């Protein structure tokens, strides 16, 4: 009987290595280094900081200069041009966010038969960028352009929870200047819990009988650029109405998909952010 040689097992790490692009990685390392530097750097300084030889980076630097990403400011020093800044503004973040959000929110609203909305932080308040109404026409929704409180709402707390400490402190101060009556000594502990859990899910303190579930839309650093929220209102006349856990699961998938679509945190980056995130993260692809 002829023996069959088993197929070699290819691990994810090995697969990534087989598709690596060392030259591209060197070029990106140089760009990131120059962007972080407050002053121009020589090729020798770049090489030392990156742990490479001058010969390794010489061709990369020359190529970046030829493509106008880097410029030579004197006989030996280099700095970045404004080209990266210009490219980033060809596709404004808010426009991209809205473009990617609409189809995801439409599918989410249809699946849950609930409305949903997308908010961003702005000087002590939230602004509703866009919303999708309940498909059946009966339910609770907020108007696009509405201004919402930050400290007491699920979406506002999510926006605060997923920020670095300095930004979080500043935003809390701005929110309290606008609504000093919403001061709470437990705010920091609440936000830390939300960051660990990965989302907020609370009864509304503004509308009786309403329940809000909100997830962050994250950038590459894990900071919230927006919050995607379902203001859940229970339809007592529906036999197949969705439960709050079902809403949370579907909303989590949608938020993760939107984060990916706008170039934010990857699927793997959610691992370990909490048991709820681990359980929901692998399902996001169906929204993509």
Image (cartoon, grey):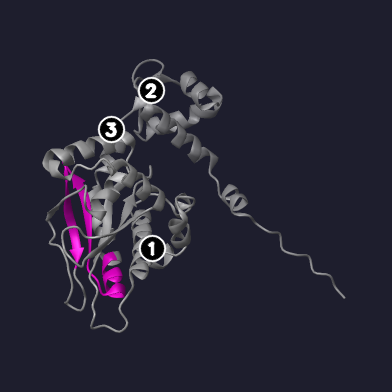
Residue 135 horizontal/vertical position (percent): 21, 76
- Give above or below for 174 relative to 70: below
Q: Residue at x 38, y 32 (%)?
A: 66
Label 2 or label 1, whichever lies nearer to me, is 1
Reading the image, the residue beneath label 3 is 82
Mark 3 vs 2: CB contact within 8 A: no
**If the image is split into quadrants, where does the N terminus sit?**
bottom right
Q: Which residues are magenta?
A: 105-132
Say what secondary structure mark 2 lies in. strand
Q: CA distance from mark 3 to mark 2?
A: 13 Å
Q: Nearer the viewer, residue 185 or 116?
A: 185
At 27% from the left edge and 65% from the top edge, which residue is drawn?
105
Q: Which residue is mark 2?
A: 78
Mark number, residue 253: 1
Label 1 – label 3 distance at C-alpha = 36 Å
Marks 2 and 1: CB-CB under 8 Å? no
Report, in whole angstroms, how far the alpha carbon at label 2 lies from the one at label 1.
44 Å
Image position of 213 with respect to 164: above or below: below
Q: Does the segment drawn in magenta span residue 128?
A: yes
Q: Is residue 237 left or right of residue 55?
A: left
Mark positioned earlier in the residue sequence (2 or 1)? 2
Question: Residue 123: where, in percent of width, then height?
Answer: 16, 41
């Amino acid at each position: 009987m002829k023996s069959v040689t088993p197929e070699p097992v290819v691990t994810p790490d090995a697969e990534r290595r087989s598709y690596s692009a060392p030259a591209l990685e060197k070029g990106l390392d140089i760009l990131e280094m120059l962007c972080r530097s407050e002053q121009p750097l020589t090729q020798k300084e770049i090489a030392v900081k990156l742990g490479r030889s001058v010969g390794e980076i010489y061709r990369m630097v020359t190529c970046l200069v030829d493509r106008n990403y880097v410029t030579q400011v004197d006989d030996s020093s280099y700095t970045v041009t404004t080209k990266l800044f210009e490219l980033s503004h060809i596709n404004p973040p808010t426009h991209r966010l809205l473009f990617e959000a609409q189809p995801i929110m439409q599918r989410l609203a249809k699946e849950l038969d609930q409305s949903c909305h997308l908010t961003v932080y702005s000087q002590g308040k939230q602004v509703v960028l866009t919303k999708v109404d309940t498909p059946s026409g009966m339910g609770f929704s907020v108007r696009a352009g509405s201004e919402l409180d930050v400290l007491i709402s699920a979406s506002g707390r999510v926006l605060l929870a997923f920020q670095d400490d300095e930004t979080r402190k500043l935003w809390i101060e701005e929110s309290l200047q606008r609504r000093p009556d919403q001061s709470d000594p437990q705010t920091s502990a609440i936000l830390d819990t939300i960051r660990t859990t990965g989302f907020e899910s609370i009864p509304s303190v503004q509308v009786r009988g309403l329940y809000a579930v909100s997830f962050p839309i994250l950038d590459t650093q894990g900071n919230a650029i927006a919050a995607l929220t379902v203001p859940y209102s229970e339809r007592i006349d529906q036999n197949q109405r969705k439960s709050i856990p079902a809403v949370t699961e579907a909303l989590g998938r949608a938020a993760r998909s939107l984060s990916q679509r706008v170039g934010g945190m990857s699927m793997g980056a959610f691992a370990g952010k909490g048991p709820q995130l681990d359980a929901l993260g692998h399902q996001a692809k169906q929204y993509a």
